[in-house]
């Protein structure tokens, strides 16, 4: 089964330019029906704290875009977007759509990045999302969530064995990004897909380095520092075989 990460230079607070760019990037790929396509955190706007400007209307243009992609490629699609709550705070979320264009689920970032003031503009979520895809149990998370292994353990306890991590992760902590992606794969005996951006916004520069890592921490694909898509073929059998052979997850203290 094919997983695809789309790494782009997000145009600041401009949905349509970002939609057009993603369509163009995906058109260069051979996408198998039933693939899982992942886009970065806040892919339609960039990592903006201007909730009033970037929040989705009802109906949501970005959800419609993801739904259309899912139907076009007969695949699952997921990506990050922003909603505004009644209290004026934002929700940094990701949504997932299936091949029929119907929404599979949504997830609200559990850990807002206080270091950059995200927690001043966005409220943190509490629940996880786990959904089924091609024999996998998929648990997507968002950016800063990567630093909290207990969140991934919640996913594992819910049966997860594939973790997409969508992000706007800056270049000043690029080594943290690559190291933590590998650590989460190794310790959870799971496939991890990190989906980052490139370019810069008004505050940060971004290194890309979107990666797909297997259950042993071995890198299957790396997008480097340029726009483009990366993909890998994965299957559940090697993941389950490793978990059956090396039963570290069974030794987790309850």
Image (cartoon, rainbow, N blue to C red):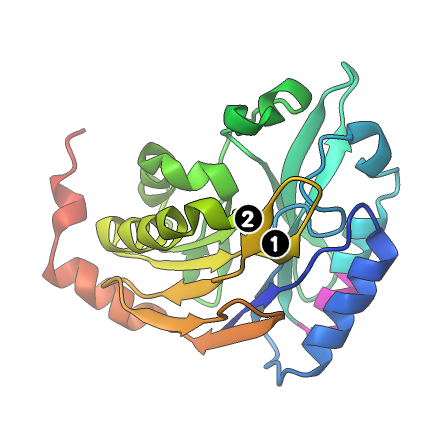
Q: Is residue 75 left or right of residue 88?
A: left
Residue 81 appears in which quarter of the rendering?
Answer: top right
Residue 60 appears in which quarter of the rendering?
Answer: top right
Q: Quadrant of the C terminus?
A: top left
Identify the element where label 1 is drawn: loop
Q: Residue at point 61% right, 27% down?
A: 118
- The image shows residue 113 at horizontal and vertical percentages of 53, 29
Q: Residue at point 55% right, 34% down?
A: 109
Q: Which mark is residue 173?
A: none
- Is residue 245 part of the magenta span, yes or no? no
Can residue 144 be seen in the rendering of this structure?
yes
Query: How many neighbours does mark 2 have within 10 angstroms: few (below 14), some (14-19), or many (20 or more)?
Result: many
Identify the element where label 2 is drawn: loop
Say which of 185 and 202 sits in front: 202
Say which of 129 and 89 sits in front: 89
- The image shows residue 253 at horizontal and vertical percentages of 15, 31
- Residue located beneath label 1 in the image: 40
Q: Residue at point 32% right, 44% down?
A: 156
**Range of magenta residues:** 67-74
- The image shows residue 38 at horizontal and vertical percentages of 59, 60
- Residue located beneath label 2 in the image: 167
Query: How many neighbours does mark 1 have within 10 angstroms: few (below 14), some (14-19), or many (20 or more)?
Result: many
Against 146, residue 205 (above or below) is below
Which of disc 1 and disc 2 is earlier in sequence? 1
- The image shows residue 133 at horizontal and vertical percentages of 50, 62
Against 68, residue 50 (above or below) is above
Q: How many marks?
A: 2
| Contact, mark 2 vs mark 1 (Cβ under 8 Å) | yes
């Amino acid at each position: 089964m094919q997983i695809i990460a789309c790494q782009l230079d997000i145009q600041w607070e401009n949905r349509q330019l970002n939609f057009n760019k993603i369509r163009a990037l995906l058109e260069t790929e051979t996408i198998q029906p039933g693939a899982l396509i992942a886009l970065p955190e806040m892919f339609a706007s960039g990592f903006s704290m201007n909730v009033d400007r970037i929040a989705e209307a009802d109906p949501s243009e970005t959800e419609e875009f993801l739904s259309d992609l899912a139907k076009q490629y007969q695949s699952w699609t997921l990506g990050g977007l922003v909603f505004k709550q009644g209290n004026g705070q934002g929700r940094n979320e990701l949504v997932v759509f299936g091949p029929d264009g119907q929404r599979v689920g949504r997830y609200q970032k559990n850990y807002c990045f206080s270091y950059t003031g995200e927690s001043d503009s966005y409220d943190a979520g509490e629940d996880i999302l786990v959904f089924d895809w091609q024999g996998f149990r998929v648990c997507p998370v968002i950016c800063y969530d990567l630093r909290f292994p207990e969140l991934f353990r919640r996913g594992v306890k819910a049966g997860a064995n594939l973790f997409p991590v969508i992000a706007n992760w800056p270049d000043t902590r690029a080594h943290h990004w690559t190291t933590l992606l590998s650590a989460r794969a190794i310790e959870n005996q799971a496939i991890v897909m990190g989906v980052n951006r490139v370019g810069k916004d008004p505050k940060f520069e971004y290194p890309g380095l979107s990666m797909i890592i297997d259950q042993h921490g071995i890198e299957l694909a790396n997008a480097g520092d340029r726009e483009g898509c990366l993909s890998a073929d994965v299957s559940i059998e090697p993941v389950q075989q490793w978990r059956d052979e090396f039963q570290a997850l069974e030794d987790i203290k309850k």
